[in-house]
Image (cartoon, helix red, strand yellow):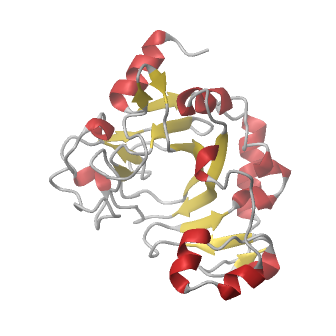
């Protein structure tokens, strides 16, 4: 049960830290799993996991990490955070996993600043409407290693989900900007102990600082949206229908091509 102060601060600042979300045993098992990974390159498949990067500097992302077995499946609705996720999404809708990946980032790595309250789309930026929670995009970052000074921690501009203006030092499109996030005036770096989780309203202006220490920053990231952003009944258009439609029609009926299992992934 969230306290009034926790709700107030999440509304005001746009983020909260959930301490000791994962046990020492879990952390040991997860880091052992990562240690045992073979060399991987973006575009490669590892089972049904897709190896991905936004450009190299952000590190390696193992997308759809819930395909990595029970170790990661249990994070989908982990008791340390799922009730907070449900609470902030609101009572009218259930959470839907929009993205789930493991990020591994070495020395020199970072991700540029992106998002912000000035982003214009149909989603609720503030996360509140007529006295009710209705966060339409929540991101949960779970630290598998300590994230302190020099470790490339997540950078946030507190309260920026409420701003109608982009940060003056930010890419005005809210795309991923060049350069590490610690250079932005007003940004703070969030430090976490291994096992802590950071829950943010994803409309918060955020990115990460550059990792200057040796070793790796290891984080599992889940993004939750209300179920309404998926198809109402879960229908997937048939291949025959898609073949008959015009390109413009296909973009409306299936804007994102579903990827069900390994044989469906494009080379």
Q: Nearer the viewer, residue 267 or 17?
A: 267
Question: Residue 86's quadrant in the figure?
Answer: top right
State which quarter of the image contains the C terminus.
bottom right
Q: Among all residues in the image, which is located at the extreme left?
A: 168
Q: Residue at x 47, y 72 (%)?
A: 54
Residue 236's image quarter? bottom right
Q: Nearer the viewer, residue 255 or 193?
A: 255
Above-or-below relation of 249 to 1 = below
The foreground one among 67 and 165 is 165
Q: Is residue 58 left or right of residue 29?
A: left
Q: Position of residue 27 (x, y in %)?
A: 71, 43
Q: Residue at x 67, y 87 (%)?
A: 244
Quadrant in the picture for the N terminus: top right
Considering only vertical position in the picture, is 49 above or below 230? Answer: below
- Most extreme residue toward the top is 4
Residue 185 lies, in percent from the top left, at 18, 45
Q: Is residue 57 left or right of residue 145?
A: left
Judge from the rendering whether residue 162 lies leftward or rightward of residue 122; answer left or right: left
The residue under the point 43% across, 19% down is 131
Residue 177: give x, y in percent of width and height: 30, 64
Left-right relation of 33 to 138:
right
Q: Nearer the viewer, residue 114 or 35?
A: 114
Could you say where residue 239 lies in the image, as x and y percent from the top left?
Answer: 76, 81
Q: Residue at x 28, y 51 (%)?
A: 182
């Amino acid at each position: 049960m969230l306290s009034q102060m926790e709700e107030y601060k999440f509304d005001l600042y746009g983020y909260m830290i959930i301490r000791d979300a994962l046990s020492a045993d879990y952390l040991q098992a997860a880091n052992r799993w990562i240690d045992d990974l073979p060399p991987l390159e973006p575009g490669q498949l590892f089972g049904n996991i897709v190896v991905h990067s936004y450009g190299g500097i952000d590190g390696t992302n193992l997308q759809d990490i819930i395909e990595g077995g029970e170790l990661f499946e249990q994070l989908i609705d982990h008791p340390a955070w799922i009730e907070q996720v449900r609470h902030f999404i609101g009572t009218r809708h259930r959470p839907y996993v929009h993205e789930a990946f493991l990020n591994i980032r070495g020395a020199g790595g970072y991700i540029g600043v992106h998002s912000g309250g000035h982003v214009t789309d149909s989603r609720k930026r503030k996360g509140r409407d007529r006295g009710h929670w209705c966060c339409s995009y929540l991101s949960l970052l779970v630290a598998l290693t300590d994230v302190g000074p020099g470790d490339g921690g997540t950078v946030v501009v507190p309260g920026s989900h409420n701003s109608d203006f982009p940060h003056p030092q930010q890419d005005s499109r809210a795309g991923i900007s060049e350069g590490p996030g610690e250079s932005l005036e007003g940004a703070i770096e969030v430090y976490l102990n291994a096992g802590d989780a950071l829950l943010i309203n994803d409309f918060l202006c955020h990115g990460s600082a550059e990792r200057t220490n040796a070793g790796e920053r290891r984080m599992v990231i889940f993004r939750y949206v209300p179920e309404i952003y998926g198809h109402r009944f879960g229908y997937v258009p048939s291949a025959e229908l898609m073949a008959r439609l015009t390109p413009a029609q296909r973009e409306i009926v299936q804007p994102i091509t579903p990827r069900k299992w390994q044989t469906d992934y494009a080379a």
